[in-house]
Amino acid sequence: MSDQFTLKKVEILGGFLEYIYIPGEKDLPTLVMLHEGLGSISAWKEFPKQVSNTIHNPILLYSRHGYGSSSFIKQKICSSYMHDEALKVLPALISRLKLSRIILYGHSDGASIAAIFAGSGPTTTIEGVILEAPHVFVEEISIEGIKMAKLAFENGNLKRGLKKHHDDPDRTFQNWSEAWLEPNFLNWNIQKYVRNISAPVLLIQGENDIYGSLKQLDAIESDLKGDCSRLVLQNTGHSPHKEQPSSVLHALKIFIIDR
């Protein structure tokens, strides 16, 4: 992904963030892509390019602090890390890059960050919110999924995969997994932000997601006051955009262009 577009860095809140801005039609809002809990720019692989070819909007994607080649700004992260990203880092980045109109696309942790940001009353105009495999509260399946990921990392398989996408995969994984496995994280809940989202919302999830059940989508739909559509994909896990890209791209086209 970064080989095809210019990878840039910008200093935000005392640490550098790597980002890529894919140009699009000037009169269209920028699609801001927010990666999953162990993601980064490179972990999106070819999907941003496929999105760009489908919708023609400008696209911003970046690696959060402590992911990819972005700087670590904390020794460890705590259970408020998604709130910190949505309420401090993301607004600062959007302001620095002078983005006045955006559509948010978040995957997993990125979806939660998108929901918090969209429901926090930002000054930026939000024209749509796309939440893929979102979490708005903690389920037992989520914690079990993190524990399984920790075992996979300790066994070496997951660590080898993360080395391709992070400068320090050990520290990145430790920070993320420890935050989720904190006892007080069981009380984490962002439904109050969802209730304040006014932009149209598209929900995407795989039926076999090991990190969350369809109760997440049901809760979001019941809390939203505005338009909401959902795409639930059979035989699909936690990353629909990787497992069924054509279905996800079709849904994006309908949501962004055809509605």
Image: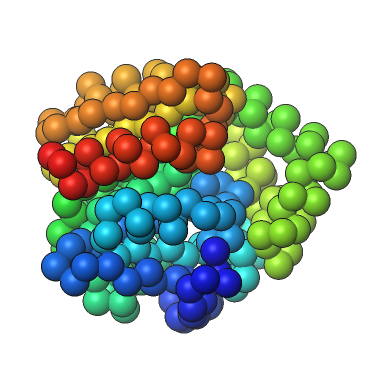
How many marks are shown on the rendered structure? 0
Residue 104: where, in percent of width, then height?
30, 52
Residue 162: where, in percent of width, then height?
71, 53
The structure residue drawn at horizontal position 34% and vertical position 63%, both measured from the top left corner, is 59
Name the side, left or right, on which 95 lies relative to 28.
right
Residue 10: where, in percent of width, then height?
45, 80
Where 56 falls versus 220 (above or below)?
Answer: below
Residue 36: where, in percent of width, then height?
52, 47
Q: Quadrant of the N terminus?
A: bottom right
Residue 212 seen in render: yes
The structure residue drawn at horizontal position 48% and vertical position 73%, both measured from the top left corner, is 5
According to the image, what is the colour scheme of the structure?
Answer: rainbow
Q: Nearer the viewer, residue 178 or 158?
A: 158
Name the side, left or right, on which 259 lies relative to 47.
left
Where 254 falls versus 44 (above or below)?
Answer: above
Q: Residue furthest right?
A: 155
Q: Quadrant of the C terminus?
A: top left
Q: Nearer the viewer, residue 246 or 72?
A: 246
Q: Quadrant of residue 226?
A: top left
The structure residue drawn at horizontal position 72% and vertical position 30%, both measured from the top left corner, is 148
Name the side, left or right, on which 214 lies relative to 253.
right
Name the side, left or right, on which 232 lies relative to 78.
left
Where 62 falls versus 201 (above or below)?
Answer: below
The structure residue drawn at horizontal position 54% and vertical position 19%, both measured from the top left corner, is 235
Residue 185 seen in render: no
Q: Nearer the viewer, residue 159 or 82?
A: 159
